Each structure stands twice: as structure tokens, then as C-alpha cells.
Amino acid sequence: MRETVDVVVVGARCAGSSTAAALARRGRRVVMLDKASFPADTISTHLLWPAGVAELERMGALERVRRLGAPAMPEAFAAGAGLSLKGRFSPVEGIDHALCVRRAGLDQALIDTAKEAGAELRERVRVTDLIRDSGRVTGVRYAERDGTERELSASLVVGADGRRSTVARLVETSDPYRENENERACYFAYFDDPHLKWRGVAAQWREGVELATAFPCDGGHTLVLLMPAVERIPEFQEDLAGEYTRTIHRIPGLRERLEGCELQTKVRSATDTTSYFRRSSGPGWALPGDAGHFKDPVTAQGIRDALRFGRLLGEATADALGDDAALDHAVLAWERRRERECLAAYQWTNQTARARAMTPIEVELYRWAARKPERVTAIIDVFSRTKSPSEVLSTRLFATLAARAVFGRAVDRGAVLRSGAAETATTVRDALERGRTRLRPLDAI
């Protein structure tokens, strides 16, 4: 029972819907396959900085998403070491705010947008194998819920099916060529939130090693995310709800923020947030979204990149379908573009995800930024990807902050120097890695 389409997209959430919408708008017949029945929730902290909201607009989904009722957050707040920063985002294509939208509603809005563009969705199905012809992927085999097996032939199979991607496993690319085992776990839940003054603020607190965030979202709720060191996972496993509550009380700023708020949901967790790049293109296949590249959620980059590089994959391949050589070049060029654009954010995220208290240099960065609002904006624009980390924390500024940390205050100067040396070594290593990536030939992944 085989039928032929232009593209099969395995996975219909952020990356899958974005890819499908871009292809369908260019007249291609696209079928999305997903094991879920939508609307359906998934483990996700689902924050979109302004650049991510702009991707919703490019996809044509923003108006649908807005109707879900998540408040616009034009301000960001960060507190740590007795200091606090508050600032506004620079606009991205006229969008100057973040959004936090629960995934069941967000994903349904994306799917509806892709279907409106002309893509087809088949739910509650399971991909069992790929169809191949002389080493080239030419379609998929899938099973419906009642066990009926079907085949779809296609010029391109897109694996947008997440970190445990079936497509990645079947093309034998599950093992990353670059990875980083991060040091923080994730525990999150939703609170009923009556505090109107906080509804427009995306907030983060640091207290010793602890890191926590609170993001107002749709339904009158606020998403509260705790990111303790992975060494504390056994404590949470022993008493998940209790340890979640106790950790909130260890962070005075967050505890004060949640006064009068009531926990509405169970606590959910993600304890393996290893970051990676996988080989994401080959003859007749591609892997957008978490299937091909993942960053620790501490910097909230995943949905933005899934939307962006799903869309770019669709745009890059729509005119190449039917010409195998042109298609293979297009998917490889798309993969290299994603690596070039995402590598700096990946490296910065890996540094941010380290389970440690704020270093003296980080404390000095907060002091420096607190003096001028435009400096706070520059820092939070790194999260929105309108500035790179190296643009904000330049070599000159890093040296200035390190000097202030060493000579300006009563601190352990040896510890500051060791921390500064470690940061310098990491910066040099990361810069060399980015340089090698830019120089690497197109087919040398």
C-alpha cells in the first residue's frame, strides 16, 4: 500500500510544522507523520525570546499563537550576588517582547498553520523503517494504530522527531560528532499567578549554585523552572514535589516572587540535557530541530532554532526536489549553515549550563551592566541572538572586569585569577572551533 508524495516529515511539532509549511507554500505535497494525537503536551520549557517570536511571524503562525493568551514580556530581569538587572529587548523585525506558550496550544497552532499552507497530517502512526534505493532514502514505512502497514515514497524524508529520533537511528547518525554533557537538571511546574506587575517580565535568579526562572504564560499561569546541579538528582528522585518546594525557598527572590501563587500542576523533569550536533543530512534525508542539534534549555534557544531551521530547510529544498544531486547539495548546505549560525550559541549555552556559583568576573559584569540600561539590553539581546556573546563580553571588557575583580574588592585574588585563566582558555578553544567550522569544506562534516 504505497503512495507517492514530495516530502515526508516525521514529527509534526516545531521543526516539522515549520518545514512542512515552507514546502507546502511552494506547491509541494507534504505529509507529516506523528505518533501523537494533537493537541498533545510534551516536556518543554517553551520560552521564545523576540527572535523566536519573529520566527512565528515568518511562519505565519503568530496570530494563532497570540490568541492562546500568553502575555507579551517586553522586560527581562536577572538577579544574583545581591545585584539585579532589568532591561528591555531590542526589537527583531518590530517584535520587542518574549512569549512563553504551553506546548499543547503552541504545537496545535503550528500544525494548523502548516495544514492551512497545504500540508497533510497523519496522527497516531509509528514509523517503522525507511525505504531505500541504492543507498538513498526514498520514503518511509509506517504503521497505523490498528497495525495496518503503509508506505510513502518521497524525494526527501525529514526527521523532525526529537532527541530520540527514529529517523536518526535508522540512518545511523544517532551518535553526535560534537557533544557536551551539561551539569544541570531541569524541574518545572506551573503556578497560578495573580501578580500583574510580573506578567510582562521574564525573570531569572542565581543563588549560590542554584539557578531558577519564572516565565508568565497562557492560562494565567507562570512556568517556574529550577535547574539544580545534576548531583542533586537523587534528592529530587526521593521526594520530587518536596525538594522542588524546598529549592524554591532556598532562593529568596523567587520565593518572594511566588508569594500568593498556588502550584497548579505536578512537577516535571528532564535530567539528561546533553548538548550535541549530529550529522543531519544525507542522500534523501535531513534532521532539523532536536533530532539533529540540541542545546541545554538554560538559554531557551531550542524552539527558535527548530522553527528557523525547519523553515530554512523547506525553503532550501523546495526547488531541488526531483533532482537528487541538487537536493543533496541543498540539504548539506543547509546543515552547514545551521552549524555556523548555532555554534557560538551552543558554546555559550554550555558555559551557562555549568553548575557553579557566579564567578567574581560575572559579578563584575552585573555591576557594569547595572550602571546603564543599554548595557542590560545588550546582555539580554544575546538570548535573542541579535548579539553574539563575544560582541557583548569583548576581550577588552573581560580584561577590565577581571582587573576590577582582582583589585577592586576584598576577594580571593588567586581564585579570581584561576577563574579568569579558565575562562580565557575556554574562549580561545571556542574561537578556534568556530574558525575551523567556517573553513571546513561543505562535505567535511
Image (cartoon, rainbow, N blue to C red):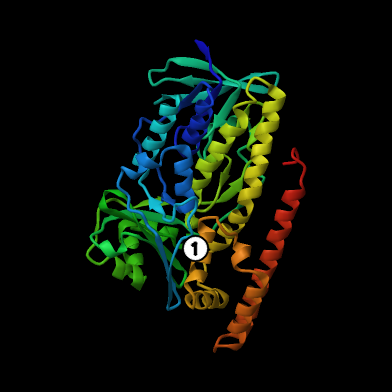
Q: Report whether 335 appears left or right of 92.
A: right
Which x, y percent locates residue 111?
A: 41, 32
Secondary element at image label 1:
helix
Which one is in front, 330 or 41?
330
Q: Residue at x 74, y 58 (%)?
A: 432
Residue identified by numbered label 1: 380
26 versus 228 height, above or below: above
Give the quarter of the figure containing the C terminus: top right
Residue type, numbered disc 1: Ile
Q: Residue at x 49, y 78 (%)?
A: 371
Quarter residue 195 falls in: bottom left
Q: Residue at x 67, y 65 (%)?
A: 427
Which x, y percent locates residue 372?
A: 49, 75
Which one is in front, 38 or 314?
314
Q: Report whether 25 appears left or right of 252.
A: right
Which x, y percent locates residue 219?
A: 27, 48
Would you call the spot at circle 1 few (<14 residues within 10 Å), some (14-19), or many (20 or more)?
Answer: many
Which x, y percent locates residue 101?
A: 36, 47
Quarter residue 239 falls in: bottom left
